[in-house]
Image (cartoon, grey):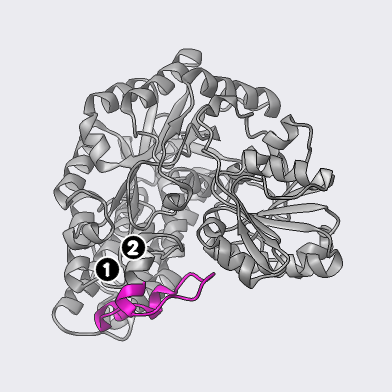
Amino acid sequence: MRIALLNPSVGFSDRRKSIPIGLAYIMAFLESAGHPSTGFDFGDSTTSAGELVEQYQLWNYDLLGMSVYNESFHVALDMAREIKRRNPSCFIVMGGPQATATHEAIIRGHREIDGVVRKEGEHPTLELVRRLDARDGLDAVPNLTWRDRDAVRVNPEMPAPDDLDALPFPAAEFVTDREYGKLHFYDALRDELRPALTINTSRSCPYNCSFCGVLTIGRRYRSRSPENVVEELAFFRDRDGIDYRHVYFSDANFFVQAQRALGIVRALHAADDRITFSFGTRVNQILKAQDVIREMLTVGLRFIEVGVESASPTVLERLAKGVGPEVNDAAVSFLTRVGVEIALDFIMVDPASTVEDLQMNMDFIERHFLDHYPHEHFYTSLALYEGTPIREFYEERWGKPFVSGTLPDTADLFERAELQVWWRLVQDFGERYQGRIDNLLAKTETLLKHPLAVECLGERAGPWEELSRLQLDSVTLRHAPVMFFRRLVDRLAAGTKPDTLEEVGLRGFGRRGTDLDDVLTSAAAGVDLLSDQLGLARNELDRALQISGAAYQ
């Protein structure tokens, strides 16, 4: 039986580094049962659905499975229609959070889709393969929603697997039209780029955040043993011939059980004391296990992706976070105090946000993240994924459902005119300035860390004055987005609604109180001049762009 599993395009992604791990687990599971498959990853492809089907002959399979999200759903449908046109007998099945949340609507409304595997896919997909291969009925395939002539059938669910150690490692290969970049982590303590590996050590999360797509898959938390995680690292080092020295734990919430998490990182450290690691979790869990965090620092902890989301108590309640702003402050202050780098998960605005909410968010960022880089948190908005309570909340608030299979555009949903102004000008600032700021910050900070630059500054020799000016420009560029967005919030709070970035204020930046464009020009000229004076090869600064992409994966 010819089997393909496919990750459709979400239409955007400039940092794709690793394979779609859910599909990789299913492919490895099928392989272990004697059913090899071909993987296709078009997650960030800009090629049209029809061209991809044609180029990779995607109709040439008996079973084709797609993992879909809100962002990729319609691309997946376009691909399915073209595959069915070429090969009507191909059985096309969807899975993933979006498909799980809307399984009946998909089968009822899209005849190009033959089935949906709900929730976790390894065992149901294997049973589907066996039934199709034997030409048996599909009634006994667990978790399957399917079309029986014109009827929609919803098969009973099987329990999600408890023994995650029994699953084979996600050692699948994917065909892609855009080459994977190498995954690295920039270790600021050692000033080095480290080859990195993504490992998932658990499934689900027991919390109820109203915006989280994990809720559609189920909240029952299960985990792997430390020994199994160590074996996976060794397996991929051997397979890839790469000395992976940083682990990105990709769990939805790695720190649900602090002692379990500590056991895993202790085991990794015992196996190789060069290993560093990072993970994501909630603020309340950090405060409950501060001693564990301190010990983790001794065995390689480098940064934590922290689910702060908002500094507004009203928004936090709407998001069902179960914590107040004081918990966010306490957790971030603790991590800063003990020296843990923070990657900030933040939702700057949602449709019901007020100017007061924005003010609280800006206050929080200025207290804790004035020097934080990148500045991605300013550009975030709430995504209303299907199957989540927050989407249902806004459907009730609006008095009508959103169109199934779509992800509503935040710009169309703001309830207050001030927030519409905020969003428009934030996007304008991002398009005009943020990319230039990011690029220059990466280059200036790498140049300033170069041993020759450090020596010149320390001894006040050579181009030390130019280096000092570049230092000041670098600080200005770090602070510029915060300063601009504070000005914008203050103007909105005062009752004015600026139309342009200039009306918000693009002057008064840095030591000279100058125009932001002038700061950018000065920094760019300084980088070019000092690179020549210090005799730096161009690729030494190009490395900076790798670092800026690796520091907060």
Say whether marks 1 and 2 touch (CB < 8 Å).
yes
Q: Is residue 11 visible?
A: no
Question: At x 46% / y 51%, what residue is drawn?
Answer: 443
> Does residue 401 belong to the magenta stretch?
yes
Residue 505 position, x and y percent, is 26, 77
Q: Which mark is residue 109?
A: none
**Corner quadrant of residue 484:** bottom left
Label 1, label 2: how many angstroms apart (C-alpha)?
8 Å
Q: Which mark is residue 378?
A: 2
**In the depicted structure, whether residue 34 falls above or below residue 225:** below
Instruction: Tell whether 450 sits left or right of 369.
Output: right
Q: Is residue 410 visible?
A: yes
The amino acid type found where label 2 is placed reads Phe
| Start-end of magenta stretch | 395-422
Q: Residues within 10 Å of mark 2 (few under 14, many from 20)?
A: many
Quadrant in which the N terminus appears: top right
The amino acid type found where label 1 is placed reads Phe
Q: Residues within 10 Å of mark 1 (few under 14, many from 20)?
A: many
**In the depicted structure, whether residue 486 falls above or below residue 370:** below
